[in-house]
Amino acid sequence: MIKAFKYRLYPTKPQLRDLDKTLMLCRHLYNAALQERREAYKKAGVSVTYYQQKRSLPEVRTELPEYKGIHSQVLQNVIERVDKAFQGFFRRVKHGENPGYPRFKGQGRYDSFTFPQAGTTGVKLQEGGKRVLLFGIGSVKMKLHCPLEGRLKTATLKREGEAWYIVFVCEVKPNPLPLNDEKIGIDLGTHPHFLVTSKGELVEAPRYFQKAEDKLARAQRSLSRKKRGSNRHKEARKRVAALHRKIANQRKDFHHKLARRLVNRYGTIVHEDLNIKALARSRSAKGVQDAGWAQFLHILAYKAAEAGRRVIAVDPKYTSQACPVCGHREKKPLWVRAFTCPACGASLHRDVAAAINVLARSGRVPDRRWARTEPSGMGTAWAVP
């Protein structure tokens, strides 16, 4: 299976200039390749292919000496990105969607370049992983916070704000956990709980964006008062970007730790097959986006695949309205959190009842005695570091 490892780089000032220059030249090549395709179709009605543009790269390096300091495969990958952009455009047109035409990349919209065969050329680890030798850049200090695994395939240099990272993509052997027949159903939420399990375990919603909202609003107001293009405007923009990046990193860290805990404890994890895109445009969009359900489910799925676990998505209809004991269905407003069935008298937390229904839809019948003997259904809270 394919696995990515991301590490922080600490380049010197000359290396930082070389990284920025490489990124700028790759962006210029991307825009030139895009312009060539647009003009060829507009003037002659022909489509320029990936291989035609790839064969012209030696001429580019001859006529523009600044490109000789960039690895040839990095330049080929730039052309491949342009080709993938057009492939995606035509695929969406074919499916009847309304896609946007591939756009030119501005200075802030092109932030990475890739060595496609890093395992053989262009990239080399040094000093036991403390440094990495990059073609055209030199030996750069690297923070190897976890060991690299498997066979190295590609390496991508990525700029995030003022920081640089390297992302190694490796081919690794799956490392399955011991067999586990235990199943769990989970119900995702936004407030006050991010996740509730069918066993009554509650995970509080961290709400990182909401907690940082005041600080972010002050930074945004400060940015709006600065003259566009000035040094103060650039510094204020960096502060806003840094705050957003911190929120995203906190959320991702929370998702990784919670997903790992679920995968280690259960052999089968069942969740609702939610239409997250539609929910992100509803009245609860702010809470849904702050919770980051799509990212969490993606992380959960690949961690489960690596560990040999199962993740099952089931139909979410009426999971919060049906009684998990007798099946009676009754619609109640969302602010009503205690579920009491008028038909059989079962009483438990509404989200716990939904999680039990989610689990039942995977093929398992819930334990009805548990539902009757645990009337509160509150369970125990998980403390996720």
Image (cartoon, rainbow, N blue to C red):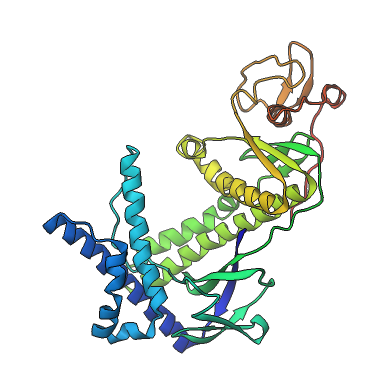
Residue 249 visible to the viewer: yes
Look at 41% across and 66% down and name the residue there: 237
Looking at the rendering, in which quadrant would you find the N terminus? bottom right
Looking at the rendering, in which quadrant would you find the C terminus? bottom right
For the view shown, which residue lies furthest in the left direction?
43
For the view shown, which residue lies furthest in the top direction?
343
Look at 78% across and 39% down and name the residue there: 201
Vertical placement of 361 versus 152: above or below?
Answer: above
Vertical placement of 266 versus 231: above or below?
Answer: above
Residue 270 image-quadrant placement: top right
Residue 349, how many percent across, how many down? 74, 29
Residue 231 visible to the viewer: no
Look at 43% across and 59% down and name the residue there: 220
Residue 29 image-quadrant placement: bottom left
Residue toward you, 44 or 270: 44
Residue 216, how many percent across, how many down? 50, 58
Residue toward you, 76 or 264: 76
Look at 78% across and 12% down and name the residue there: 344
Residue 73, how many percent across, how many down? 41, 75
Residue 335, how many percent across, how many down? 63, 28
